[in-house]
Amino acid sequence: MKKLIFLGFALSFAISNELSFRQIREDIFNIDDKTLITYAKKIRLKAIPSNAYELEELIKNTSPDYEIYPTTTKRIELGKKLYFDPRLSRSGLISCNTCHNLGLGGVDGIAASTGHKWQANPHHLNAPSVYNAVFNPNQFWDGRANHLKEQAKGPIQANVEMAEDSQIVVEKIKSIPEYVNEFKDAFSNDINIDFDLIAATIGIFERTLITPSRYDEFLEGNVNALSFDEKQGLRTFINKGCVLCHYGINVGGAFRGFGFVRYQYVNYGDFNGNENNRVKVPTLRNVARTAPYFHNGSIWSLTEAVESMGRIQLGIELSEQEIKNIISFLKSLSGKLPQIVYPELPPSSDETIRPKLDY
Ligand code: HEC
Ligand code: HEC
């Protein structure tokens, strides 16, 4: 019952002046590709802009600290080093890249993320991808952080992740002369290197982790960017109502509500969502690269994930053909990963605090 009320709410949300969502749903298999693009945009599907200026504007809008810290090449390079530097962790072994492996779609590929002292996430939470995270208005499965700078502070200090004290992180960075120089160079000579700035710099690097795909080209008007099967999949995705929750630039990721943490594996881990028991709708960009699925990583197969979504979120049984179509559409969301040259990290000095493995 609760579910129906929410879907009703979503539905009225999607209604535009001239065209109701109901109408779009009914028409979707009888319209040409150009009209499909128009409809898709009406129901809030959005491309990552190919135009560099538009893209930068979008990133500005989704990065509240952009005004204080605009993106520059030097800041990106420094943020990348910090992202890959395991010395930000207590053990000296775990970096952001350990759990958000940029070669693996920005995830770790295991069900419950595992950090310091081989501890699994206590709520059995699966690591979401860092790719395109800049476009998520809410970060984390319960949406508790609003942007990347706030977000980056969490895992460094969390004792099951990188387990390092914020002050010690700052001391470590300050003990490495090349880092100090790079901070001066990237910001200003009198810059105060504190934990906030370190997190912000990592966030600046994360602004570059975006993955435009053929789907974006399609939404921008190139009707041949997607194959027939992929377009059928997009039509099915719209027709069945997946788009009610998975919309916006990240095909999800944008909304805290509308999700129901109810499926056969719901008790895997003790995560109950936010204060209203809702879980963030994850992005579907690169979903073919980011198994296992759902907040607790309980489902490994994309087919099973799609099938369960139909059942759990929409109360429908999808046919085999529909699932196949949807999956070919979802695969078209695997974007072009940015080319990342693995950085050379500056050496520690005699003053650098040594790793603690806590055996
Ligand atoms: C031990 C594994 C681990 C490490 C190390 C780690 N993360 Fe995460 N990350 C996670 C997990 C698990 C979540 C989801 C946690 C939650 O929702 O409460 C997460 C969430 C995120 C998110 C939110 C994405 C979204 O869509 O909600 C971002 C961004 C992120 N991490 C970036 C980073 C950065 C930057 C670092 C390094 C400073 C880092 N992570 C280190 C496991 C890790
Ligand atoms: C009522 C909102 C809603 C609808 C409708 C919906 N989803 Fe979801 N979707 C979610 C939420 C919430 C999650 C995360 C669930 C969790 O982690 O426990 C999710 C997760 C997923 C995932 C796993 C992503 C990941 O990285 O873990 C896939 C794939 C997916 N949905 C596809 C679909 C498809 C295909 C449809 C249509 C058949 C659909 N969804 C309809 C809300 C919805």
Image: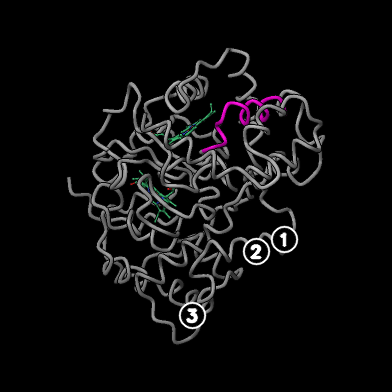
The quarter of the picture where residue 74 lies is: bottom right
* Residue underneath mark 2: 56
What secondary structure is found at the residue carrying circle 1?
A: helix
Per the model, the C-alpha gap separating discs 3 and 1 is 28 Å
Whether residues under marks 2 and 1 lie with C-beta atoms below 8 angstroms apart, the answer is yes
* Residue underneath mark 1: 52
What secondary structure is found at the residue carrying circle 2?
A: helix
Q: Is residue 245 above or below residue 344?
A: above
Q: In which quarter of the image is the N terminus?
A: top left
Instruction: Residue 145 in the image: state x and y as whole percent.
Output: 38, 57
Q: Which amino acid, by three-letter code, is at mark 2?
A: Glu
- Given this view, does label 2 or label 3 mark the residue nearer the observer? 2
Q: Earlier in the sequence, mark 2 or mark 3?
A: 2
Dot 3 alpha-carbon crowd within 10 angstroms: few under 14, some 14 to 19, many 20 or more: some
Examine the residues drawn in magenta and state their main secondary structure: helix
Instruction: Residue 351 in the image: state x and y as whole percent.
Output: 29, 71
Q: Which amino acid, by three-letter code, is at mark 3?
A: Lys
Q: Is residue 58 magenta?
A: no
Left or right placement of residue 162 versus residue 71 in this view: left
Per the model, the C-alpha gap separating discs 2 and 1 is 6 Å
Question: Would you say residue 218 is visible in this rendering?
Answer: yes
Whether residues under marks 2 and 3 lie with C-beta atoms below 8 angstroms apart, the answer is no
- Given this view, does label 3 or label 1 mark the residue nearer the observer? 1
What secondary structure is found at the residue carrying circle 3?
A: helix
- Specify the segment rendered in magenta: 231-244
202 and 288: which is toward the camera: 288
* Residue underneath mark 3: 184
